[in-house]
Image: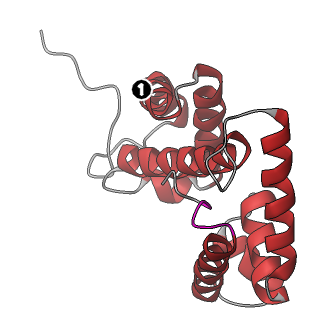
Amino acid sequence: MATEPRLEGPESNHPLDFAQFFDEYYARVVRGVALFLASASDAEDVAQEAFVRILERWTAVSAMQSPDGYLFRVAWNLAKRRRRRASLFRQSPRGAETDFASRAIVQADLLIAIRQLQPIYRDTLVLHEWLDMTTEECGRVLGVDAGTVRVRLHRARSQLQTALGGSYGDEE
């Protein structure tokens, strides 16, 4: 006696149910992200955020050819962002050991470097990296399109890498 798959795709006559999708993939996302982040609690946070973002776009995501692929891409991007941010506080630009003094130096160096960015790059970077806005959300706030936001982020990150001796975003 064959059982039907729990999840139906866009090619079927049955809509994909978010609750079933969540039940099917949550643990897998947590396990995958935990390997990357080496922290179960951080992995759970990332998985939860990924599912919130998926739910916000559920109508479009459920109609995709591979909604699970989209979910894993969102989770992976969130994990990379979390790891990059965490790396700013774990090591100094000069590779010093993790301690309070070196974290303070990193934070001070980072703040100085951010203040030296041109305002359009600084604003874009702060909205995206520290306020967790998507490129589309940043674009709406700044009055530009998402492509312009991505260009500004690239330039801001490049300038920060130069200012910090190449340590900004090395974890990616």
Can you say which quadrant of the picture contains the N terminus? top left
Kind of residue sitting beneath label 1: Arg
Label 1 element class: helix
Q: Nearer the viewer, residue 64 or 76?
A: 76
Q: Residue at x 86, y 65 (%)?
A: 111
Q: Position of residue 113 (x, y in %)?
A: 79, 72
Determine if the magenta segment contains residue 146: no
Residue sitting at 78 percent across and 43 percent down? 102
Give the image location of residue 143, x and y in percent: 79, 90
Q: Indicate the colouring scheme.
A: secondary structure
- In the rendered structure, the answer to whether residue 32 lies left or right of residue 78 reads left
Residue identified by numbered label 1 = 28
Instruction: Please say if 15 is above or below 23.
Output: below
Q: Nearer the viewer, residue 86 or 29?
A: 86
Asked whether 165 falls inside the magenta stretch, the response is yes
Count all numbered tags in the image, as a single digit.
1
Percent coordinates x, y for residue 86 in the rendering = 67, 43
Residue range in magenta is: 164-168
Q: Nearer the viewer, residue 144 or 23?
A: 144
Count residues near mark 1 (Cα–Cα under 10 Å), then give few for <14, some for 14-19, many for 20+.
few
Q: Say above or below: 83 vs 20.
A: below
Viewer-proximal residue among 81 and 84:
84
Residue 168 % position (x, y): 62, 61
